[in-house]
Amino acid sequence: MTTSSLALGTEPNEHGYRSFTLGGFSFERDEYFVHIEWPTGRHVAAIEPFLKALMRDVAWNFFYGTVNFDSVIGTVNHYGTVDLFAGRFNEAYRMAELDHLENFPHDEIKQTFQAILADWVNEGFDPFAAPQETGSAYGLKNGDNNSAVTRERVTAQRMVGLPNDEPLRSDASGYPVNRMFLDVDQSEPQVEVEPGYEKEVSAFNFFAYLSRSDVTWNPSVVSVCRDSLMCPTTEEFILPIIHGNDRVEWFIQLSDEIVWEVNDRETGRPRAKVTMKAGDCSAMPADIRHQGFSPKRSMLLVWENNSAELPGLIARGEAPTVPVRF
Amino acid sequence: MGDYTTVFGRLNNYTKGGVELINDDAKNYVFSNMFEVASRAKPWEKVAVAKNQQYVLEAIRAEGTSEWRVTPHDEFALVVDGDLVVELLDPAKPLVDANESGSRAVKGDPQGTPMGTIHLGHGHMALLPAGRCYRMRAEQPSVVLLQTIQGPDTVEKWADICQKF
Ligand SMILES: [Fe+2]
């Protein structure tokens, strides 16, 4: 059986949805829930948060480290292959030896997840949108939203707005100012360029660019300094995944407020609560998992070190799990 | 109801959050506020507020006119409070090796070709291109968040700026 025939799924069930298998895992949906089974157990979860988590995992190419969909299901990125797990980062499942993990080639798991999104996301539901900006994920099969679920994250090569790089956002390009950012100044910087330096003398309104984001909890690369990536994002409601990074990452709160729940990366036990207001800077250590809560749409600068060597260094204990000691 | 106010921080008007501990050490979060850092900094002092291996984000209090600097790699300046004028210059001869990290001061006024001038307001970001020189000017105290690599002038004073308990 080839990957493509697997990815197509079964014939639709009585709710109109196809079922899918990936290795020993199977996925089935009804009007409200996803039902996941594996050789040592099964899991039921509400379909809306599941699809929102699945959407990020696919659009981010499995991101950095662990993407927990909830306390049981998730993926670990090995940058070429990906683990799909059940209970692997849940203390009780581990102790009962009921956890299960299978490793897949990147393309195989991505194709399956994309096929699930294509079939299970109904017309009018956008998994990237804030709850008040989209329709319902629930109910019987009703059309699709393929233009929404095939979006990939935006990655500038050098800086947004440079010639031949990621373009600015505008009303004309389909990115109106978000309803919660109507008070954000839209003026662009005044740039006086001497002839011949058009590719280097460049500036843009970073806050206006963010105010026009049509997605939530979806960092996009805006400026690149070697492996240092500025990945700002606009946040509203709850981060649909619980991120267990394989390296240190940083949060710089640019506007408004987010509260982060921080739990142990391995067990899920609570460790801290971090409240971030505009101007606050906080590291997320490499041995935790975090989930953010944003009451009003806010601007968050996620700052990543993209070095391919970091996960190995930290896993082998050759790099610390915190960025500085003082 | 329904009229939203976006809250940005300012040098003289910011509110700080913080880390509430359940089972952890506050120092692990290296928690600071860039406006508090800038409010206590000297003009143009490059204080690291975030660090990941060799990479840093520096909070810079912009006030008056800076020295000329040259950067071996791209840097990015985000104005998080106030207004900033950036002059760019293409030096007549290379002033820094491209393998170096972090920007450094240029002695005196560098010779070369003016590339242009950028007037940045609140929330604006400018590219400070690799191999080029720049000088900044701020009429009123302003704050810049600089994406760069740790260099000879990066100031680390984590114990002074971070939550410890
Ligand atoms: Fe994260």
Image: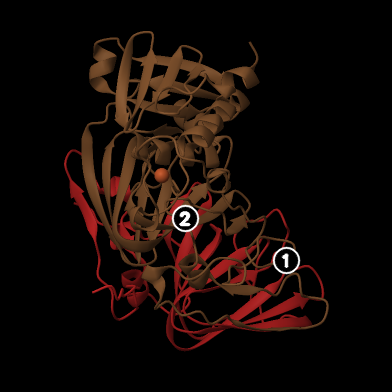
Q: Is residue A276 left or right of residue B86?
A: left
Q: Which residue in the protein does label 2 denote?
A: A215
State the residue at coordinates (81%, 71%): B93
Q: Which mark is residue B131?
A: 1
User: Residue A109, how many percent across, how many down?
Assistant: 55, 25
Front in this rendered view, residue A55 or B149: A55
The percent position of residue A42, horizontal first and vertical second, equals 32, 16
Residue A298, x across and y down, in percent? 36, 63
Does the image show residue A317?
Answer: no
Q: Position of residue A296 (x, y in %)?
A: 30, 63
Answer with the quarter of the image where residue B119 lies. bottom right
- Crowding around mark 2 (Cα neighbors within 10 Å: few <14, some 14 to 19, many 20+) is many
Towards the viewer: B37 or A227: A227
Task: Look at chain A in the picture and name its colour.
Answer: brown
Label number found at residue A160: none
Q: How is the image coloured?
A: by chain
